[in-house]
Structure formats: C-alpha cells, structure tokens
Image: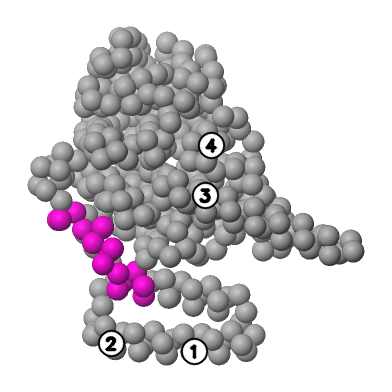
Amino acid sequence: MVGGAGAASLIGWQSDVSLRADELRKSGKACILLWMDGGPSHFETFDPKPGTRTGGPTQAWLTTIPGVQYSQNLPALAAKAADKLCVIRSMTSKEGDHYRATYLSQTGYLPTPAIKHPAFGAHVAMQLGSLDSELPSFVSLGDLERSPAAKSIGGGFFGANVAPFYVAAPGMPPDNVAIRTSEERFRRRMSLLSRVDREFEENGAGPTAVIHRDVCTAAARMALSPTMSAFDVSQEPMTTRAAYGQSEFGQGCLVARRLLEAGVPFVQVTLPGWDTHNKCFETCQKLGGQLDHGFSALLSDLEQRGMLDSTLVIWMGEFGRTPEITRATGRGHHPDAYSAAMAGCGVKGGQIIGATCPLGAEVVDRPVSVPDVLRTAATALGLDPDLEHETSVGRPIVTLDGGTVLDGVLG
C-alpha cells in the first residue's frame, strides 16, 4: 500500500509539473538577453560621472525621466526608451575573471569542476519552449568573437536538446542548413541515419544514441521548415532594417524579434568588444552607437507589435570597468559596481535601482547580485526559481542559487 501510495504521489507530482509547463507555454512569454561580452563600462553607458576625475570625457545625456541621465553614447535610449527601462546601477559581485563572471551571469552559479550548470536560457527553453517547434528554443546570435570557454555555457546537464543554436552572422540564413540535394533524397538519408542510430542504441549506446538521434531529427526538421525564414531580415522593409542599424548587433536584435514571432522563447544577442583596456572612450562610443540603435529600435518595435508585455529584455555584461583611467585611456575589470537593465514583461520602466558613489567605484545604495536579477527575471517569465532538477548522477540542483526578487521592479 505504501509503495502504491508513493507511486500515485509521484504520478500526481509529474502531472502537476506537466500541467504547469503547458500553462507556461500558453502564456506566450519570451526573453531576449542583450549580452555585452567583455564587460561594458557603466561610466560610458548607464551611469555617467561627468566632471569627475573618473568620468573621463564622457558626458551625460538627459532622458525623458526627470533627474535621470544616461551617457552621451545612448541618445536614442534616453529619448525614446527611458520610460520602458528599469536601470540597475548597483550591480556588484566578486568575480573579475571573464569566464567565471560570465558563467555566474548566465547560470546564476559559480563554476565548479563537478557540474556544468544550464544557462538561464536553457531553463527558459525547457520550460517555455514548444515540444513541436521546428526551430530551436534557445538561439544565440553574434557569437563569432566570444571565447571558447564562454561559448561552452549552454545546456549544461540538461543536455543538447536545450543547448543554444549559434548563429555567427545575424541577418543571414545560418551556416550549414541549406539542403544540397533533393528533399526526397534528403529524407531517405535521414531515414537511414535513424535506423543506424536505433541499432547503435539497441547495442548498448543507450541515452547517448537517443540524444544524437533527437538532435539530428530536430536539425533536419528545422532545415526543411519554412520557419527558417525568421533568420532572414531581407524580408523586412528597409525602413525597419535601417531603424535597427546596419551593425550585426542591430540586425541581430531584429532577428531576435522575428524569432520570437516564430515561437522561439529565448534569444541571446551578443555585442562583443567591451573589454576596453585600451581606447575605452573611442571604443565605447562606437559600441554605444550600435547598442543605442539596436536596443531602442527593439523596444519600440516590440511595443508597437503588442509584444513587450510578454517579452522580457535584459541588458547586461559580466562586470563593469574601473574608475581609474590608464595611460592607454582604458579601464580595467571592475565587478564591485556596474550596471544592468531590464524592460518588458511586467517590469516597471522609468526608474533607477540603486546607486554608486560619486566616483563610480562602489555601490552606496541597494546592492544587487546576479542571482537577484535572474530570480526577478524568472519570476517575470512565470518560472519557478526554486524548481529542483536532477543531474545525470542524481544530484538535486535548483534553478537558481539564492537571490531575491527585486522590490519595486515588477508590476
């Protein structure tokens, strides 16, 4: 009787989880992560310090919110999107190494040799992705210049089914997906591969063969699908393409919107180059122009299409930059104080969370951790941050390691 009761309880729990997953998918919520690879300077983006010895030549730009200023590198965001953005100026961590800080920012955990944690995008893909979708549930755009170490952060112990699908050059069809033969011949080849995989599985390969077969089947379904057109921005009016800017990042933001419309629940768009040890001001001005065009156009486009209420947009990098300016007009790594931003999906815009000191060196009001941001993001998307998962060796791991939902951020 006890065993029967336990089994019934387990079945009931599984049914509850499946029911919750179905309800989540019906919500139509999705997330876009604008990832600033290298560590963007808060001084040159959302927390300028003009007129101070640490502020450098970067000036402040008035936004549409009284008393709130962004840097001069973000005029469109200041004029058109400040009412939608919740800017967090009090991000802080102890991780000043690119890999460790990236891992923490994208998983909510510190790296460990024993476990490869799933990225936040993999959690979103698993819980919000459609099982019948012909496109991947996690797409990463513009990763060409990312380090191999950072690029390995993906599905973790969840496996390849929710790992990111990388597209190096946004705006163009992905590499290696064009069918080089007739569709009929391609399908025959896939049928043969499936039989080989099945024999491999029956002869002891087990889960490895199953994962390989599932990934190959999904890849073939994607290659043959008309939804692949979501990657092709040439179908957009020239005015729309121009609004996003002609950079790979800007076009990546446009592709992200198209992918969400096609049913992809998580898209990461990477803007590399923020590791400004040299020529910080010149580089940030160039990168800021790409960011400003793409980010502001994305928020405006999502709002006009009625998608912003169900789409969470996160802007962040792995850390900030030092107040000290080197002889090479650069700034070093600075995890003590930096900025992040969120918009959409119930986030209250037009506000600033936290503050740094007048020199931008340390947080003086409302320190915010990476787990705080990710827990807030998960809550906005309807995910359970404390949902327990099991690794391949049976170890229980919750979605996020600590953190609290940021007060006043969600409506």
Q: Earlier in the sequence, mark 4 or mark 3?
A: 3
The quadrant of the image that shows the N terminus is: bottom right
Residue on which disc 1 sits: 196
Give the residue at x 38% y 48%. 268
Using the image as rendered, state which of residue 353 and residue 30 is in the foreground.
Answer: 30
Which residue of the protein is positioned furthest toward the left in this rendering?
238
Position of residue 226 in the picture relative to residue 337 (left or right): left
Q: In the rendered structure, does residue 355 fall within the stretch colored magenta?
A: no
Residue 106 sits above or below residue 343 on the image:
below
In this rendering, the label closer to the viewer, 2 or 3 = 3
Residue on which disc 2 sits: 184
In this rendering, the label closer to the viewer, 4 or 3 = 3
Q: Earlier in the sequence, mark 1 or mark 4?
A: 1
> What kind of secondary structure does the magenta stretch mostly adopt?
helix
Task: Give, as a three-letter code, the residue at label 3.
Answer: Glu
Give the residue at x 41% y 87%. 191
Q: Are marks 2 and 3 in contact (CB under 8 Å)?
A: no
Residue 304 placed where, x, y %?
Answer: 24, 36
Residue 229 sits above or below residue 362 on the image:
below
Residue 29 placed where, x, y %?
Answer: 42, 44
The figure's colour scheme reads one colour
Q: Earlier in the sequence, mark 1 or mark 3?
A: 3
Using the image as rendered, state which of residue 403 and residue 144 is in the foreground.
Answer: 403
Residue 142 seen in this snapshot: no
Q: Which residues are magenta?
A: 220-235
Circle 2: element type: helix
Give the residue at x 58% y 53%. 19
Q: Which mark is residue 247?
A: none
Q: Which mark is residue 379?
A: 4
